[in-house]
Image (cartoon, rainbow, N blue to C red):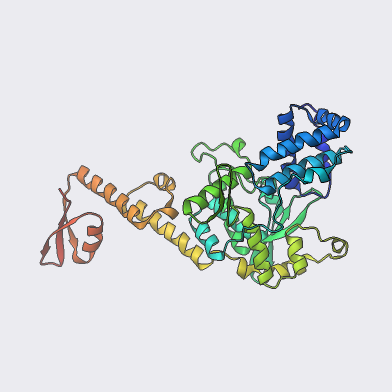
Amino acid sequence: MNQSEESSVATLRASGKLAHQTKENYILRIRAYLRRVGMSPDQFIQTVSRDPKAFEEDFVKFIAEVSGTSASSTTAFWRDSLRRFLEINRVKGIDWDYVNQFIPKVRKSGQDRAPTLDEIRKVVTVADLRTKCLILFLTSSGARIGSIEYLHWRDIQEVEFEGWKLARVTIYRGEPEEYDTFASPECYEYLLKYREIREKVGEIITPASPIFVREVNKRRFDQIKVRPVGVRTLKNQMGELLNQMKMREKLTDTKNYRSYEWKQCHSFRKFFKTRMEMSGVKPIITEMLMGHTIGVSGSYMKPTQDEMVSEYAKAVPNLTILGEMGEKADRNVEFKRGILQKVGGYSKEEVDKLDLANMEDAEIQKMVKERFLGAMANNGSRQRVVPIGEIETYLTQGWEYVAALPNEKAILRLPI
């Protein structure tokens, strides 16, 4: 599309009242529909203005097609996207009441639920660091997954409150929808770990650097290739992880789409809302922290940052996912790393390639045994005299007991 053809789309993007990500999703739908009819935005507006009834009939046919392969909420979103686009460009004469008769009824409240604390904990424990940070961020801030692409380190400001170090987060900075929320001390700690690891491989992080980035090749790091990770990529990876873990039951499973008992990313926002309510946080503060409009109250309700963080702090214990369990999981990973490097003789580069969090102890022992036996066989040494107290350790590494010696030592050998 050239610049003039984009003008009508730009009008929608610049309009107020809609959340930033909602606008972008509307534009994706609009462009898809325009490809279907083979028109530019401006051509489409002119055509519909001349004959709104023809558009109504064509759109009703389109709805029938979409309804057979999509959830009712998806069909309604197509209508909302086109309606908003046409209204913002002052196209009149469309009988939306007539169109609405063909839209499948959408449930006023979704069937999906918020995941439990234990369910989230299981996912976070096995997730890689970036996904771990993402889940902790979504569950503790209530932010929409769509905001992730627009977050930069300048949007994270450390806040101290009663011995805690948490983060104030500015969502959609510079946009009409800009608002502030918080990330828990736990989430903030993991975000700093994520940042530190990126800096260690050579990334120069500035206030303008994105918080969540695409994976980069650590051996051939290129600063120019550092880009924010796309929301679709994050959603797909989250869905794959949840499916691999078999964490959710399917509510609907058709040839064309599926729905689950809790959504792969939006469910974390529901978790946030639920835990805030459970913690006794003032409902209006919860709405503000989620970026919801609060009507006329927004003109008069102007709490200070101290008042906001004081309310948010009530929910911190209920928004903490890992706690001692997270520390234990991290220690377990470091233990596995130490066994492989110090006992098995694996290099740091070899260990870095492994998903230690998801490896069973038996796998670690097998790797050590194979490496150890291989090294000993290559050296030509198939017997060893060891102290009695060390026999058990060697047996787990594949050695066989031969005989005891009178000096509290024993002879071991490698299997033939």
Q: Residue 372 at what x, y percent from top left?
A: 26, 49
Camera sees residue 161 = no
Instruction: Give whichever of 346, 48 is nearer the camera.
Output: 48
Instruction: Give whichever of 231, 261 is nearer the camera.
Output: 261
Q: Which of the 4 image quadrants contains residue 37? A: top right
* 219 relative position to 367: left or right: right
Q: Residue 259 at what x, y percent from top left?
A: 59, 51
Q: Which of the 4 image quadrants contains residue 79? A: top right
Q: Which of the 4 image quadrants contains residue 314? A: bottom right
> Count the marks: how many?
0
Above or below, 393 against 234 in this view is below
* 328 relative position to 275: left or right: left
Residue, x 64% and y 64% (percent of image)? 165
Instruction: Give whichever of 155, 284 is nearer the camera.
Output: 284
Instruction: Give whichever of 70, 410 is nearer the camera.
Output: 70
Q: Residue 10 at what x, y percent from top left?
A: 81, 37
Q: Residue 15 at what x, y percent from top left?
A: 84, 44
* 64 relative position to 301: left or right: left
Residue, x 62% and y 47% (percent of image)? 212
